[in-house]
Amino acid sequence: MPRLPFAVVVGALALSGCASRPAMPPPVPEGQGASQPLAFQVKRYPGGEPYDIASDRGSVVVLDVWATWCEPCKDALPYYQDLANEYAPQGLKVYALNIDEDPRAIPTFLAETQVTLPILLDQNAQVAERTLKVRGMPTTYFIDRKGVVRHVHEGFAEEFLAKYQTELEALLAEPTP
């Protein structure tokens, strides 16, 4: 079966207003078994410094894949900002992985949402498409201290916040390897 280019999929998501609720369980990122750590490298925004997800082993990581044109992302990122503020002392790190083709839209979006999370740039959505298998926006990954993806959430809706917090607190309660 032919595969649509990621740009076509992203464009369709933009026209549909992004996902607000998960429709079906998202796929496990490629190469990720029950115990395989997630592996990818991207650049940090705005300076372009390299970032390797492996550098955060020992911490629980929330990785939110988003774009400036995604309406539900405007609701999700401030929530993840609050989680970062509350749980950082327990070892939580939260990153916002942006897939926009043009990063010049990012400052306006961040000013509007008042988000100060570290932003990672996924050039040409390579990580989102090939590694994470993102199907809708936003998609959020909860990664344990060993670097293993434990929970994937497609879309964003307020009724799921209690579940997200429970999952996150369980990951934070696990011992550091």
Image (cartoon, rainbow, N blue to C red):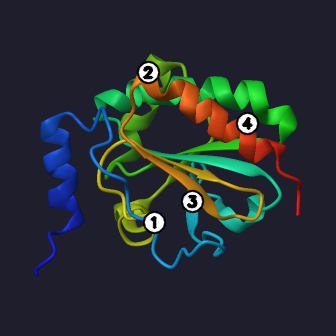
The amino acid at mark 2 is: Glu
**Of marks 4 and 2, which one's residue comes earlier in the chain?**
2
**Of marks 1 and 2, which one's residue comes earlier in the chain?**
1
Q: Which type of secondary structure does the marked residue at label 3 adopt?
A: strand
In the image, residue 119 lies at what x, y percent?
A: 56, 44
Give the CA distance from mark 2 to mark 3: 30 Å
Kindly check if marks 1 and 2 are in contact, taking CB atoms under 8 A apart as contact.
no
Q: In the visual, does 2 lie left or right of 146?
A: left
Give the CA distance from mark 4 to mark 2: 18 Å
The amino acid at mark 4 is: Glu
Q: Which type of secondary structure does the marked residue at label 1 adopt?
A: loop
| 24 shown above or below 21 | below
Q: Which type of secondary structure does the marked residue at label 2 adopt?
A: helix
Give the CA distance from mark 3 to mark 4: 28 Å
Q: Which residue is mark 2?
A: 158
Give the CA distance from mark 4 to mark 1: 21 Å
| 29 shown above or below 47 | below
Residue at image position (59%, 60%) is 149
The amino acid at mark 3 is: Lys
In the image, residue 6 lies at what x, y percent?
A: 23, 64
Residue 169's disc number: 4
**Of marks 3 and 4, which one's residue comes earlier in the chain?**
3
In the image, residue 1 lies at what x, y percent?
A: 11, 81
Q: Which residue is mark 1?
A: 28
Q: Which residue is mark 3?
A: 43
The amino acid at mark 1 is: Val
Residue at image position (38%, 40%) is 104
**Of marks 3 and 1, which one's residue comes earlier in the chain?**
1
Compare residues 157 and 170 and report the one nearer the observer: 170
